[in-house]
Amino acid sequence: MAFALKNKFLVFILIVSGALASAMSRTLSETVVAEKYKQWMAQYGRTYEMKEEENMRFEVFKNNLEYIENFNNMGNQPYKLSINEFADLTNEEFLAYYAGYKIIPSTVSSKTKRFKYQNLTNVPASIDWRNKGAVTQIKDQGHCGSCWAFSTVAAVEGIAKIKTGRLFSLSEQQLVDCVRTKGSQGCKGGWMHDAFEYIVKNHGLAEETRYPYKKKDGTCSPRKAAIKAVQILGYEDVPHKNEEALLKAASQQPVSVALDGNGTAFQFYSGGVFTGPCRTSLNHAVTVVGYGTSEDGSKYWLIKNSWGKSWGENGYMRIKRDFNSKKGLCGIAKRASYPVA
Ligand SMILES: *[C@@H]1O[C@H](CO)[C@@H](O)[C@H](O)[C@H]1NC(C)=O
Ligand SMILES: *[C@@H]1O[C@H](CO)[C@@H](O)[C@H](O)[C@H]1NC(C)=O
């Protein structure tokens, strides 16, 4: 009897101390997260008008941080995640603000026929167009679905440097303001095809400094668009769903591609060769500015993004190449195109 009683008491003590310990670790980690949140707000100059907003954003931040730490703690992942300037956004919000590629309806026959690199042989094993001075610094599209304009501009900057020897930083805002079609609507999203076509018809694109980026829709300014830095003759599609063709094109110039940037892992990618998870419904546009093989032997595409330098490898991502699907990982080989100069 005495024994049983003592035991019950012990059980009681264990339960109480267990609850205390877990309550303590909860508050402790809450404090740690709160401290990280404060540091993060300071680092990215984030302020919220309302306390409710700040509290709500804190919950989002905490969920993201948990996802990131769980992912990194899983070990043997080929890539890493980290907190970046998008840490207070859910993945849905993030995509709504920072993507902007529109899926081309199958009714729009958009594929060009000629592929000038079709018969190319001796494709180099790796290339990095940054080392050839054909890539401008990482830009930031802000809360505007203008990825399509950034993807276009990076490809045009590249071919202009390759053809003329001069690297100009060109205007995305001109495309955001002046390309108006059914599919391309400034910050509401667009297509690189429309942008290439506009540049051809307009006989060129202005420099960034003449027509600076505003992170929002504006009215097309013929005055700012008048002085053109770079002209292109046209554009061509890389044969769809063909990574080998994409390789040929990317060996000759930076190439505009669309991909599926859906998912928290993509949002917080910070380095290594990205291997998914992702699907292939295209919602974001970037530019392939190289390819190669990492030290551990994984083949990758080097992509230039427009989400600032806090994302990825200083704004870039290496994403798995030669994926066992014709579409490529995240659909990267589905809709590639490049300007012709
Ligand atoms: C590639 O070679 C084939 C066969 O010689 C030729 O018909 C085709 O026009 C070539 N393509 C290009 C883009 O030069
Ligand atoms: C992202 O993925 C989720 C879940 O798979 C899906 O519900 C959502 O529609 C996707 N969003 C986009 C933009 O593809």
Image (cartoon, rainbow, N blue to C red):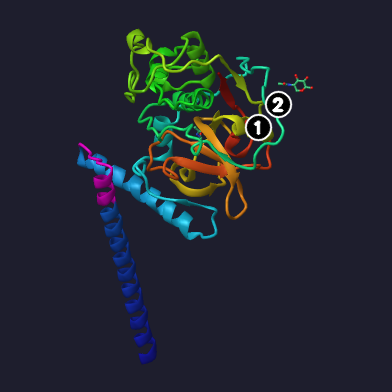
Q: What is the crowding at mark 1: few (fewer than 14 residues within 10 Å), some, or many (at least 20)? A: many
Q: Are marks 2 and 1 in contact (CB under 8 Å)?
A: yes
Image position of 270 with respect to 236: above or below: below
CB at mark 2 closer than 8 A to ligand 1? yes
Instruction: Confirm whether the magenta stretch covers residue 246.
Output: no
Q: Mark 2: which amino acid? A: Gln
Numbered disc 2: secondary structure? loop
Any mark on residue 118, and which? 2
Q: Which residues are magenta?
A: 37-49
Mark 1 and ligand 1: say if the CB distance to the nearest ligand atom is below 8 Å: no
Q: Label 1 amino acid? A: Lys
Question: For numbered disc 1, what is the local secondary structure?
Answer: helix
Near-viewer residue (218 or 300) = 300
Q: Quadrant of the C terminus?
A: top right
Q: Nearer the viewer, residue 126 or 147?
A: 126
Q: Give the quadrant of residue 111.
A: top right
